[in-house]
Image: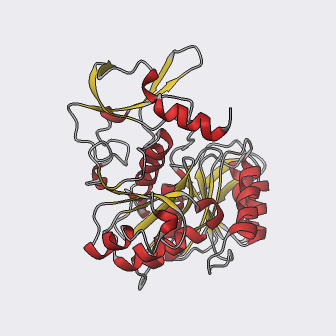
Amino acid sequence: MSEQKLSRQSYLSRNVGDFPDEMEVLGRRYVKVEDLRYGTNPHQPSSYYRPVDVVCPIAGMEMLKSGKSGLSQTNLEDISYSLNIIKFFVKPACACMKHVNPCGVAVAVEGESQRDVYVKARQCDPRAAFGSVVAFNTEVDEATAEEIMSTFVECVVAPSYTAQALGVFNDQERFKLNKQMRVIKVADVASLPKYVGDDARHARTLKVLADGSLVVAEPLLTHVRGLDDLKRATATAKDEGDQVSSAAVSDQQLDDLLTAWYVNLSVRSNGVVIVKNGVTLAVGTGEQDRVGAVEQAVWKFQEKYEGEETIEGAVLSSDGFFPFPDAVEVAAKAGVKAFISPVGSIKDALVIKRANELGVSLFHAPERIFSHH
């Protein structure tokens, strides 16, 4: 059967799955929002539920412009993970998500418009951003809408839109490529839990194993609330003695370290994020080894990044500790000057010593942020 016929058949029979109108999970009652176009793949029926006793920004979203068919599970996941990134920022921010990983993220620096921020995020990896979900934490204006419509986008998500922007999105004569693009209004993104200690009981994660058994976990939140939580790396070992990261770091690099950390919370592990002047230069994701994730990120910058920044002076976040100095050496050779990673390797002192020799700074985070979504 052709993929086109399979997709059509799956869409028409999406309710074959036994999905009730209401269900109870871990003592909380859920009601069905809608049957989805399909799950992760077209042959997987899927439905979407919300808890009845919680205000949910995503479940309460308003579809201002819909495509010819509804949302898929992957659409919803990309919407969720993009909002999970931009929720951390007060300055205008944009995240382009594809297959539940960020293609690019940007936060405004002084003098930049919302359109500038979107272009920076897209140009991190424009090939991957083709057909992505694009999320904003500020109202979308006409200039940004015009730029969005210049390439193929699946969904746009924002707290509000100007009337002129909505006019652009609905101009199907000028923008035939995006006739089916969905425009979604979602409120109160800042209410999503961010930090350890926030009330996140309603956001516990469920992982269903192959035999139907469940793993229930608290959501991935962070202890890092701001710049005061970025600590110079320190460690002691018999051979290296006391080691403290000593290389200089600029105020912008500190801001970029924080941005890189917040983005990495929504990157599939092993995750590495390179940032400069508020924009991701590359996102290394899904590698099984730490140095491989760094090598992938450096390669992606060299081969896929189409923005205006150079990698010299950039920063890098790692969602796990550096077990050896090799990953730091690879990134430092490329031009990265500051790093943030979890503490915990038995070779932390050796890694810090090598970073000092290379003239790069290393900061330790209080937690590991593996994401195996």
Q: Is residue 323 visible?
A: yes
Residue at the spot 67% in from the left edge and 78% down from the top edge: 310
Residue at the spot 47% in from the left edge and 71% down from the top edge: 175
> Between residues 314 and 63, which one lies in front from this camera angle?
63
Q: How many marks?
A: 0
Image location (x, y in percent) of residue 361: 63, 66
> Between residues 250 and 151, which one lies in front from this camera angle?
151
Residue at the spot 31% in from the left edge and 20% down from the top edge: 23
Query: In the rendered view, would you say 302 is above or below 44?
Result: below
Image location (x, y in percent) of residue 2: 68, 37
Q: Is residue 191 left or right of residue 271?
A: left
Q: Is residue 326 left or right of residue 8?
A: right
Q: In which quadrant of the rendered image does the N terminus lie?
A: top right
Query: In the rendered view, would you say 112 is above or below 64?
Result: below
Image location (x, y in percent) of residue 257: 53, 64
Image location (x, y in percent) of residue 210: 59, 18
> Between residues 71 and 91, which one lies in front from this camera angle?
71
Q: In which quadrant of the rendered image does the C terminus lie?
A: top right
Q: Is residue 224 visible?
A: no
Query: In the rendered view, would you say 15 is above or below 75?
Result: above
> Between residues 205 and 344, which one lies in front from this camera angle?
205
